[in-house]
Image: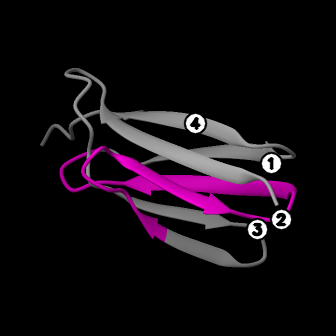
Amino acid sequence: MPKLKVKVIDKDTGEPLFARVLISDQVAYKLVTDESGEAEVSLPEGKYTVEVRATHYAPKKREIVLDRDREITFELEVLVI
């Protein structure tokens, strides 16, 4: 099974972020990033929606095709209230 590595960083500073990662097709996989802003999981090949959320940041979502090992980086922006 291919591995998906997700990295989440602050868009302005490049600092890693603790974030919740939701990967879904017909099944939802929930992950949390570590202190380096990374999370990794092995999944069956297929199409997935990857969504990341971090406190005080705007969430982001991306559609991917997982047919080999992949690494994707999400750059989150601080929410302006």
Query: Helix or strand or loop: what does disc 3 sit on?
Result: loop
Q: CA distance from mark 4 to mark 2?
A: 17 Å
What is the magenta range? 31-57
Q: Quadrant of the N terminus?
A: bottom right
What x and y, as percent, mark residue 22?
A: 53, 65
Q: Which residue is mark 4?
A: 72
Relative to 41, say whether 6 is above or below. Answer: above
Q: Is residue 42 left or right of residue 81?
A: right
Is residue 64 one of those drawn in magenta? no
Q: Is residue 52 left or right of residue 77?
A: right
Q: Of marks 1 and 4, which one's residue comes earlier in the chain?
A: 1
Q: Nearer the viewer, mark 3 or mark 1?
A: 1
| Residues at discs 2 and 1 in contact (Cβ within 8 Å) | yes
Dot 3 amino acid type: Asp
Q: Residue at x 23, y 20 (%)?
A: 12
Q: CA distance from mark 2 to mark 3?
A: 11 Å
Q: Residue furthest left?
A: 81
Dot 1 amino acid type: Leu
Q: Which residue is mark 2?
A: 44
| Residues at discs 4 and 2 in contact (Cβ within 8 Å) | no
Q: Of marks 3 and 1, which one's residue comes earlier in the chain?
A: 3
Q: Which residue is mark 1?
A: 66
Q: Quadrant of the C terminus?
A: top left
Dot 4 amino acid type: Ile
Q: Which label number is shown at residue 80?
A: none
Q: CA distance from mark 2 to mark 1?
A: 8 Å
| Residues at discs 3 and 1 in contact (Cβ within 8 Å) | no
Q: CA distance from mark 3 to mark 4?
A: 17 Å
Is residue 36 one of those drawn in magenta? yes
Q: Of marks 2 and 3, which one's residue comes earlier in the chain?
A: 3
What x and y, as percent, mark residue 46?
A: 87, 57
